[in-house]
């Protein structure tokens, strides 16, 4: 799996954890090991510009996903996953930090960025949360991936509750 993490935000973030959880999520979703992903960490000004340009919405947001080859997890266990370019995930640590503080179960900026990375990966794989059934499926999968990664890493406690907008 080729995953690049590029921090352009000026904020210190745990880039290794972002890389690790992205790799874990893609492996768990059975994405081809030669697929490529880019994660970019930006400040609020850059995120606001992207949010306006692509979503026509004001203000910075927490995470945005820009799919490339529209890869999907294999439907069957014996199906060979396609290889390709997943796309880009853009994260904003300043928004993540505030969301972690505001969450029902307060958590760190880095924990929120880990959650947002998984959220972004799932969006790249075609998952969405516009409808209640889609939201239940996506957020359930998101929690299972984050919890599995945290357990594998020996981190205590369940994953942070979803704060993704």
Image (cartoon, grey):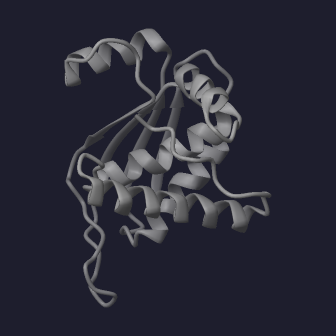
Q: Is residue 24 visible?
A: no
- Which picture quadrant has residue 75? bottom left
Task: Name the residue rendered at 37%, 59% in the picture.
Answer: 136
* Along the line of sight, the residue nearer the viewer: 51 or 37: 51
Residue 29 visible from this viewpoint = yes
Q: Of residues 80 and 147, which is closer to you in this image? A: 147
Where is 55 relative to 126, above or below?
Answer: above
Across and down, in percent, residue 86 comes to 31, 51
Query: Residue 113 appears in which quarter of the rendering?
Result: top right
Q: Quadrant of the C terminus?
A: top left
Q: Residue furthest bottom?
A: 78
Q: Position of residue 142 (x, y in %)?
A: 47, 57
Q: Residue furthest toward the top?
A: 45
How many numbered badges does the structure rendering display? 0
Horizontal relation, residue 23 to residue 53: left or right: right
Residue at 75% across, 57% down: 157
Position of residue 150 in the picture relative to residue 10 (left or right):
right
Q: Position of residue 131 (x, y in %)?
A: 23, 51
Which residue shows up at 80% across the image and 58% down it?
156
Across and down, in percent, residue 102 comes to 62, 28
Residue 81 appears left or right of 104: left
| Residue 86 to residue 55: above or below | below
Q: As drawn, is 85 to the left or to the right of 60?
A: left
Residue at 28% x, 54% y: name it: 132
Compared with residue 43, is residue 130 higher up or lower down, i.e. above or below? below
């Amino acid at each position: 799996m080729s995953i690049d993490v590029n921090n352009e935000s000026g904020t210190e973030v745990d880039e290794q954890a972002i890389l690790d959880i992205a790799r874990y999520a893609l492996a768990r979703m059975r994405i081809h090991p030669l697929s490529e992903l880019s994660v970019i960490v930006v400040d609020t000004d850059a995120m606001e510009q992207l949010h306006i340009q692509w979503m026509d919405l004001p203000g910075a947001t927490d995470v945005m996903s820009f799919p490339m080859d529209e890869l999907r997890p294999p439907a069957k266990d014996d199906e060979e996953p396609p290889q390709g370019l997943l796309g880009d995930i853009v994260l904003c640590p300043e928004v993540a930090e505030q969301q972690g503080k505001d969450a029902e179960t307060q958590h760190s900026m880095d924990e929120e960025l880990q959650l947002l990375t998984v959220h972004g990966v799932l969006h790249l794989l075609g998952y969405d949360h516009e409808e209640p059934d889609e939201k239940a499926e996506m957020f359930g999968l998101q929690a299972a991936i984050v919890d599995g990664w945290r357990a594998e890493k020996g981190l205590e406690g369940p994953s942070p509750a979803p704060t993704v907008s």
